[in-house]
Each structure stands twice: as structure tokens, then as C-alpha cells.
Image (spheres, helix red, strand yellow):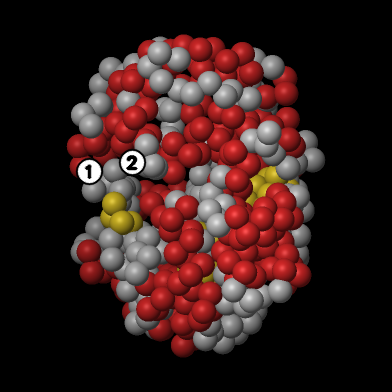
Amino acid sequence: MSDPRSDLLLPADPGVRALARRLHALAAEQPIISPHGHVDPAILAEDRPFPDPAQLLIVPDHYVTRMLLSQGVPPSRLGVPSVDGSPVETDGRAIWRLFAAHWHLFRGTPSRLWLEETFRDVFGVTTALSPATADEVYDAIATRLAEPAFRPRALFDRFRIEVLATTESPLDDLGRHAKLAADGWGGPGGKVITTFRPDNVVDMEFDHWAANVDQLGEVAGEDTGSYAGYLRALRRRREAFIAAGATSSDHGHPTARTLALGEADAAALYDKGRRGEADAADAEAFRAHMLVEFARMSLDDGLVLQLHPGAVRNHNRWLYATHGRDVGGDIPQATEYLHALTPLLDAYGNDPRLRVVVYTLDEYTFTRELAPLAGGYAALYLGAPWWFLDSPEVLRRFRESVTETAGFYNTAGFVDDTRAFCSIPVRHDVARRIDAGFLARLVAEHRLTEDEAAETIVDLAYRLPRKVFKIGESHL
């Protein structure tokens, strides 16, 4: 008897499901290209055994910790480090038992799907998690983690990851990537590459922005006391990132606004920020201007420009004050693209040398703005649903919403956008299953031949992300 989970997320109609199975089998053969994510490169550079199951799967997963917080369980009881000196639970088994006691909260969520498939496919654990089985599941995963086959590099190869992009600040010395390159894993053409993420030196509202800019100058060997020196420092760091394998930059701005300022106006705004006199409107204008400036830099050095707008960062102020950034306190907001992107697109949108991949946390913009924009400008591609939207339901709606206007080939393939290394193959498989179901429906409706669908699903899973993110290409 076949495993019923082999048809996970595939269409319920038997005829369409049979088509989807065949298409998914083709996608499943493809290696994983992970062009955007937040895995700590130290995991692979040092290749140490993973810690206990709770430290690996619960503590760093803000999808999990924020759900329990919503039900009154503070992150400190789940081992999330504090920044205010508050005591934090350190017993992995106690954390795991608390998580298992609240497992019912995740019914119907992508977190449950990812975790169950990770237990099953990565660790071979098929026991259903519950309060009664918490210790059994914990011990089974802990036993696996002690085996050499479950060290990070061994899992990387087992997952069939061809390229994994991490994300670093311009202030990072890229030492872990240097270690990976020395071991034959990093650098241009390597298995692990970096991504240039300059938010902490671009966003004047970022904590310690002025000090960060000073540090940027020190790292780059440039005087950032002037706007011209600041731009030189950014270019120098981009060069260092490209030498470490980077093929893209990434920008996590609150909005998608772009603005083309003259050099004198930009310098005046920069100086105002350096003096500590910039207000929120000034910070937004500077972020907007710098997106156009980064597009200009991309024409020179070839980096793909990724834009991830729409998050209200640290909305939960108590959580931020207690545990810091990136622990589940961010909330999506409505985001406008049509007018916001116009200055950048007016300047460079028709230049095929530029690649701008735009994401959204506002799925209502798929049909109204993003698909028509991507279908009308050579430089613009649509990024996959991410963060709060990377669920089976939204992945389906994404294909249904954008394909009619932008087609498949103005999209950029799937990105897992995760810190959870062990969930990478699961997340890519979910996206491939959703695409298999969507394409199978088009075949069943006689809108595509099966041969066309077969070619398309391999493109979506493998060839498109390689092409759009210039994996394996020279950037200069």
C-alpha cells in the first residue's frame, strides 16, 4: 500500500492528481537552489553537531514562539534569549515538553506541515507528536543528531542543495564565508554564497545608524563623513561580497517607495542624518533614494536587487524590549507598488541588464499591481510569497493571480527565506507540490500539454532561480 502522504497537497480529483504526481516527480529530481535565506553560515563553516532538538527546532523558530506567545506562553520559557537580562529556560527537554503541550495550536498552519515533514523526512520520526509522546520524539531526534550523517555538511549534501545563499550586513567581515571558500564550499561558484543586506547602514531609523555608518567606513577603508565617501564605501563592500560569491543584494524596507534625488539633495539628506536631525520623512526619503542608487550600482557590478517591503518591524514593543529583533514581533502592512516603484522603473526598468526581484506581504497586490508591472518591464521579476505568505494556500493563489498577466517566466522561482536549515527541503517540496497541482489543472483543462507542463515545472523548480539570480554566472 502506498504512503498516503506521497500525495500531500496534490489535487483531490483522481485524474488531475495522477497528472500532478508525474509532474511532481520531475520537480523532485531537481537539486535545490536556495537564493534567499537566513541560515547562519557558521553552521556550515564550523560543521559542528547540531544542539538538542529544542535548540535546533524550537528556540530560533519565531513562527513557533510567536504562536505560543499569542496564547500567553512567554518566549523566555521556550529558551528565546533575552536582551534585558530576564531569566531564560535552558533545559531542552523542558522546552520541548512545553512545545508539545501546545502542539494543537498549530493545526492547519504551515508550521505544523513543515515540522511534521521535517520530523518524518529528515529525522525518520513517524510518531505523532503529542504531550504523551514528547519525550519519545525528542529522544529519537536527539539520537539522530548525535550521528555523523546528521552533521550540517552531510545534511546539506543529502538535501541535494546545489547553492545556498545566506544574508549578511556590510559590516560583516565575511570570515565564515572565507572559511567555507578555503574548504572548497564558498566563493563564486561555491555551494554557499552570501547576500549583501545593507539595511543597517541605509535606514536612518535603524538602531545606531550613525555608528554603523562609521563602522562601514572602517571596514571598507573609506571616509563615510561625506555622502560621496559613503557611496564609495558601499561599492567597496559590494566588491567584497561579490568576491565571497554574492549574486544579489537584499533590501528590507518598510515600503516599496523609490526616489531619484540629485546628488546635492541626497548629500544634504545624508548630512542631516549624520547630525541626528533626520525625522521619519527624511529617513523614508533616504531609503527611497538609495534603492535607485543601488539599482545604478547593480548595473555596474551585476548584483540582482531584491526588495522585501511591507513589514512593520518590532510592532510588539514588549517583545522587542525583552528579546530584541527578529523574534516574531513584526507585522505585515498594506503596501503600494505602482507609484512607489515608478522613479526606479523610469530610470532603469527597461534595461534588461538589471534584475529587480520584488516580494510582497500584501497578496492583494498580486493581480492589481505586481503582475502587470512584471509583465511590462524587462528589469522586474516577481518573488515568491514569503514570510507570512509562504503557505500552501497563498502559493496556490499566487500562481492563480499572477500567471494570467505575468506568465511563469516573469517570476523568480521559490525562495525558502528561512533560518531553519533542516526545513529547507520540506519548504521547497511544498512549493513544488503546489506548482505540480496548478500545472496539472492547466493540462486537465487542455490549456497546456503535459510536455509543456513538464518543462515548466523543471523551470520553476530549478532553471528559473538559477537564471534570475545569476547562479553560476559572472556578474561583471
**On screen, 164 above or below 407?**
above
Categorize mark 2 by other alpha carbons within 10 Å: few (<14), some (14-19), many (20+). many
Along the line of sight, the residue nearer the viewer: 236 or 49:
49
Where residue 4 sits, quadrant-wise, is top right
**On screen, 217 above or below 348?**
above
Count of numbered badges drawn on the protein: 2
Q: Report helix, strand or loop for mark 1.
A: loop
* Residue under label 1: 316
Categorize mark 1 by other alpha carbons within 10 Å: few (<14), some (14-19), many (20+). some
Kind of residue at badge 1 = Asn
Left or right, residue 52 beside residue 77? right
Along the line of sight, the residue nearer the viewer: 310 or 168:
310
Q: How far across and down, in percent of the image, does residue 230 sit?
A: 46, 63
**On screen, 275 above or below 178?**
below
Q: Does the rendering let one see residue 136?
A: yes
Kind of residue at badge 2 = Gly
Q: How far across and down, in percent of the image, does residue 2 sit?
A: 67, 37
Where residue 327 sits, quadrant-wise, is top left
Marks 1 and 2, how far apart at CA: 8 Å
Image quadrant containing the N terminus:
top right
Circles 1 and 2: CB distance less than 8 Å? yes
Image quadrant containing the C terminus:
bottom right
Q: Does the rendering let one see residue 463?
A: no
**On screen, 421 above or below 299?**
above
Q: Residue at x 52, y 86 (%)?
A: 376
Q: Residue at x 34, y 30 (%)?
A: 104
Q: How far across and down, in percent of the image, does residue 275 sit?
A: 27, 60
Q: Report helix, strand or loop for mark 2.
A: loop
Q: Mark 1 or 2 closer to N-term? A: 1
Along the line of sight, the residue nearer the viewer: 127 or 294:
127
Residue at the farthest right position: 184
* Residue under label 2: 328
